[in-house]
Image: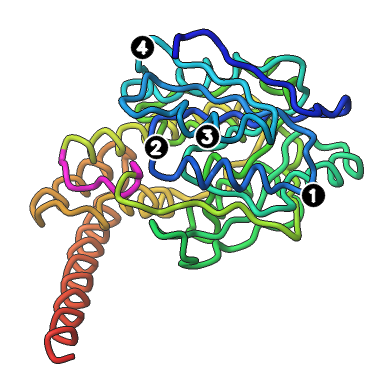
């Protein structure tokens, strides 16, 4: 394949306003992702696939679906997702034509069959410009692992941030549909290293003082696997990058809230605890995790008591996790 876009037009609905955009690199689950799109009960969409100069034959998978749904495929000459994931998102979104709504999806997640149908129903019913799906987490074999806590029907920026940092909510980029007008007028996706926090900052920016609407009665299925950035916590430099990206994200939030007259509901204690989750679940040495704990507390200018509280918190967490691992190994040994 060349880098020219390959397009088909299979029974395109004149009222189709949705662009489903897939920045593609991995081949492992792409067939399953596209199958879930083919199975949608509402076909009012075009799928745009931006091949990030993958070493795999992405088009070999894509062409199986060209007779079933509207697909625009393009293979880029240069891989940029490995260095700048946000830039890859942007150039894939640049592929879309006249659609008014954008769904940035992925090459390894899946959507339930009525997702698009429910989106259109909500779009007609409500005057919102940012919609959200609740999520089920699946494993590498597509088995359900658990349901993520469901979002309230409507949510505002400060509450979204506070609930996420408290661990009451979590979300991923694939569960949001946004209007093209928001994307173009608000400045596209925010950039942070590794795209760590880029999606959350963008949703906050898109919302401003308005509300996020959750689409009920359907789910997106997000896949947890060893290829996720969120599961790559064994490299000290990589963990530092994520911590620094999170610190940049917090600085951005502080500025954005001030500029828009929004109240930051999240205490310094919750912010430090949220930041240290990356450290707590990492595979680093005890000393490395202790040093990172002090680094986070220093950067957020916590008091001396809070600093030592989190030191003991980290040590306790490490001991607790190691005990659970040892108990699991002992049980497996005697089974």
**Residue that extends furthest to the bottom in the rendered view of this protein:** 334
Residue named by callout 1: 118
Span colored in magenta: 228-236
Residue under numbered circle 4? 78
The residues tagged by marks 2 and 4 sit, at their Cα atoms, a distance apart of: 18 Å
Which of label 2 and label 3 is nearer to you? 2
Q: Kindly report the distance in space between the C-alpha atoms of the residues bearing marks 3 and 1.
A: 22 Å
Which residue has dot 2 on it? Answer: 27
- The 10 Å Cα crowd at callout 1, few under 14, some 14 to 19, many 20 or more, is some
- Residue 58 at x, y = what percent? 43, 29
Q: Are marks 2 and 4 in contact (CB under 8 Å)?
A: no
| CB atoms of marks 1 and 2 within 8 Å | no
Give residue 192's quadrant in the image: top left
Viewer-proximal residue, 81 or 206? 81
Element type where label 3 sits in the image: helix
Which sits earlier in the primary sequence, circle 3 or circle 4? 4
């Amino acid at each position: 394949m060349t880098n020219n876009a390959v397009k088909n037009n299979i029974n395109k609905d004149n009222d189709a306003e949705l662009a489903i955009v897939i920045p593609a690199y991995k081949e492992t689950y792409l067939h399953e992702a596209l199958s879930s799109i083919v199975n949608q009960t509402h076909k009012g969409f075009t799928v745009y696939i931006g091949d990030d100069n993958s070493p795999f034959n992405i088009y070999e998978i894509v062409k199986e679906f060209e007779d079933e749904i509207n697909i625009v495929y393009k293979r880029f000459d240069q891989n940029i997702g490995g260095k700048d994931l946000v830039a890859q998102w942007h150039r894939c979104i640049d592929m879309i034509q006249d659609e008014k709504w954008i769904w940035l999806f992925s090459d390894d997640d899946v959507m339930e069959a009525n997702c698009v149908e429910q989106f259109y129903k909500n779009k007609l019913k409500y005057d919102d410009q940012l919609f959200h799906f609740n999520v089920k987490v699946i494993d590498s074999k597509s088995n359900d692992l658990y349901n993520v806590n469901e979002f309230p029907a409507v949510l505002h920026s400060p509450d979204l941030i506070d609930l996420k940092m408290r661990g009451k909510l979590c979300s991923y980029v694939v569960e949001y549909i946004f209007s093209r007008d928001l994307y173009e007028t608000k400045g596209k996706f925010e950039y942070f290293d590794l795209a760590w926090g880029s999606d959350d900052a963008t949703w906050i920016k898109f919302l401003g003082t308005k509300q996020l609407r959750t689409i009920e009665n359907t789910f997106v299925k997000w896949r947890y696997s060893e290829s996720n950035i969120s599961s790559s916590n064994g490299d000290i430099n990589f963990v530092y990058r994520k911590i620094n990206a999170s610190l940049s994200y917090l600085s951005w939030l502080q500025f954005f809230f001030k500029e828009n007259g929004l109240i930051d509901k999240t205490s310094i204690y919750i912010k430090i605890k949220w930041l240290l989750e990356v450290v707590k679940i990492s595979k680093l040495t005890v000393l490395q995790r202790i040093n990172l704990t002090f680094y986070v507390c220093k950067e957020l200018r916590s008091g001396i008591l809070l600093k030592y509280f989190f030191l003991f918190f980290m040590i306790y967490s490490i001991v607790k996790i190691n005990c659970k691992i040892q108990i699991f190994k002992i049980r497996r040994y005697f089974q």
